[in-house]
Structure formats: structure tokens, C-alpha cells
Amino acid sequence: MARKAPTIEELRKMVPLLERMSLIYKNDKTVGRFQDTVMAAQLMREVDVNGVEPMYTVLEGRTVKVREDVIEKTDKKHVLEPSVRTVEDYFLLPPSNVTIDDVAKKHAA
């Protein structure tokens, strides 16, 4: 059963959470781009993939060496240590067109 794309009002309610998570700025252009992205994702959900074998790479026709995953014990504090800012144990990175100083000013206000 196909699900309908979220309305602009529903997307506007989602944006503050996404803004906090990814530091996108809430404006009409951002909401419109987000709506386009959600609609594109919705189309992908409607594709019938029954009987299609999953790929492990998108590089068709090339030999790709696949290694076994190796689980290594790590210290979360040590991994996050070099980060300037973290939120809920995630590295906090500004969008590529926004400096960390711009982000700090925005969140200080």
C-alpha cells in the first residue's frame, strides 16, 4: 500500500529536529528541498524489489575485494576527543557552506 508524501505542514514540524541533528537552516528553500527528498525516497519505497539480489557495491563490472568485518574494542571518549563539538555522542559538523563560528553564533542566540 503506497503511503502519501508528507504535507508541507508535516515537514515543517520535522525540520526543527532535523535542524538540530544536521544543522540545516529552516527556510522555504530548505523545506522545499526536504519535501523533494522525502518524495524521492517515497518513490524508492514503492519499487518492487522481490526477487532482486542485493548488491554489495554499486560498481558493477568491477572486482571489489570484500573483507570480513573485524570488531575492535574502542573507547568512545578517546574517539570523540578530537571533536570541537559533539551532541549526544555524535560529531557535530557544520554544513559545508557554513563555518563552525556561524553555527556557534546561531545556537548562542
Image (spheres, grey):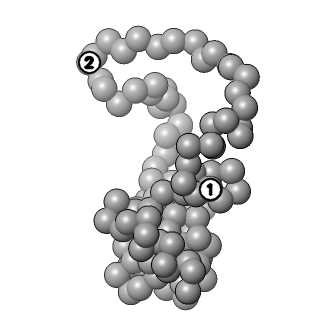
The quadrant holding residue 108 is bottom right
Few, some or many residues within 10 Å of mark 1 (<14, 14–19, 20+) = few
Question: The C terminus appears in which quarter of the rendering?
Answer: bottom right
- Identified at 36% across, 68% down, the residue is 98
Mark 2 against mark 1, which lies toward the viewer?
A: 1
The quadrant holding residue 16 is bottom right
Earlier residue among tags 2 and 1: 2
Compared with residue 7, is residue 63 higher up or lower down, i.e. above or below? above
Compared with residue 33, is residue 90 higher up or lower down, i.e. above or below? above
Compared with residue 54, is residue 39 higher up or lower down, i.e. above or below? below
Look at the numbered disc 2 and give the secondary structure of its residue: loop
Look at the numbered disc 1 and give the secondary structure of its residue: strand
| Front residue of 106 and 30 | 106
Rendered image: mark on residue 86:
1
The kind of residue on which mark 2 rests is Gly
The kind of residue on which mark 1 rests is Thr
Rendered image: mark on residue 61:
2
| Front residue of 94 and 108 | 108
- Identified at 46% across, 25% down, the residue is 56
- Identified at 70% across, 27% down, the residue is 74
In x, y percent, where is residue 41? 46, 59
Rendered image: mark on residue 28:
none
Q: Is residue 6 visible?
A: no
Q: CA distance from mark 2 to mark 1?
A: 40 Å
Left-right relation of 19 to 36: right
Few, some or many residues within 10 Å of mark 2 (<14, 14–19, 20+) = few
In x, y percent, where is residue 92? 55, 57
